[in-house]
Amino acid sequence: MARWIKRLFLILVIIAGFIASPLAFPGPLFAYGVTDGKLSVYADKPIPEIQAKAFIRDVEQRLTKIPALQTDHPMKIYIANEKWRQRLLWLIVPYRAGGFVVTPVSNWHAFFSGADFLSDRLISRSGYRPEPPRTLGYYGAHELTHVVMSKKLGWVRFLLLPKWIREGMADYVAMPDESADKLFMKIGKKKADLPMMKTYGVYAPFRLLVAFFLENQHWSADRLMASDLSFDQARKIVFAALEQ
């Protein structure tokens, strides 16, 4: 019995290593790269340098929105355009995820399922291209905010954050400026139906709460990340204030 347990454990370790290795050390899978400042972009197809550097500057500008989350550490984005690379890297990631970070395996880097730098659009695995304002720059800032948050908090604490804080802060950083009051007037208590998602993104209700606490209540990012408010609790506070 003990022998079979050891064998099973060894098999599980091998499988985990097979899944984790390309996520932790993706460099060999990507032959092309462009670097500007502290951010590098790598892909499995040639990258237009001028547009890639414009994308990098766009991402870096968005990342300045919350000073507490800024870092001088070099970061990377890997773009898997080819299907076999997507299948390899998306083994434990939802099919619909166009961009992702796997904490704690990802080390200062994020992944995209595809990119069209000329039109500034991310390309999902199904071929869908999210519409502005969810541009390529938006996705870059969103995923790299996750990277910085996980490094700042530690991966365990990062994963234990309420989803509305974890995703809402990343969306707040990545989206163009929009006050909580204006966003509330646009989406209010609406459900995240398809038209709303196309315009404001699936995380808009989370972004609304984050914007309220950071801007209206003047909370620091550290205070927000230390909060244990549930989504429903935070929503009650925000709606009670904005409905007046």
Image: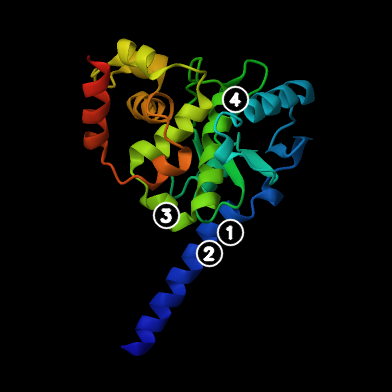
Q: Amino acid at mark 3?
A: Arg
Q: Secondary structure at mark 4?
A: helix
Residue placed under numbered mark 4 in the picture: 137
Mark 4–mark 2 distance (CA, rounded to whole Å):
32 Å
Along the line of sight, the residue nearer the viewer: 233 or 117: 233
Where is residue 5? Give x, y as percent: 36, 82
Instruction: Report the side of 26 relative to 113 (left or right).
Output: right
- Compare marks 4 and 1 and give the one earlier in the sequence: 1
Q: Residue at x 77, y 36 (%)?
A: 37
The label nearer to you, 3 versus 4, is 3
Along the line of sight, the residue nearer the viewer: 128 or 51: 51
Dot 1, crowdedness within 10 Å: few (<14), some or many (≥20)? few
Residue placed under numbered mark 3 in the picture: 157
Q: Amino acid at mark 1?
A: Ser
- Compare marks 2 and 3 and give the one earlier in the sequence: 2
- Compare marks 1 and 3 and give the one earlier in the sequence: 1
Dot 2, crowdedness within 10 Å: few (<14), some or many (≥20)? few
Residue placed under numbered mark 1 in the picture: 21
Q: Is residue 198 visible?
A: yes
- Compare marks 4 and 2 and give the one earlier in the sequence: 2
Mark 1–mark 3 distance (CA, rounded to whole Å):
23 Å
Mark 1–mark 2 distance (CA, rounded to whole Å):
6 Å
Where is residue 91? Give x, y as percent: 46, 49
Q: Secondary structure at mark 2?
A: helix
Q: Residue at x 48, y 20 (%)?
A: 130
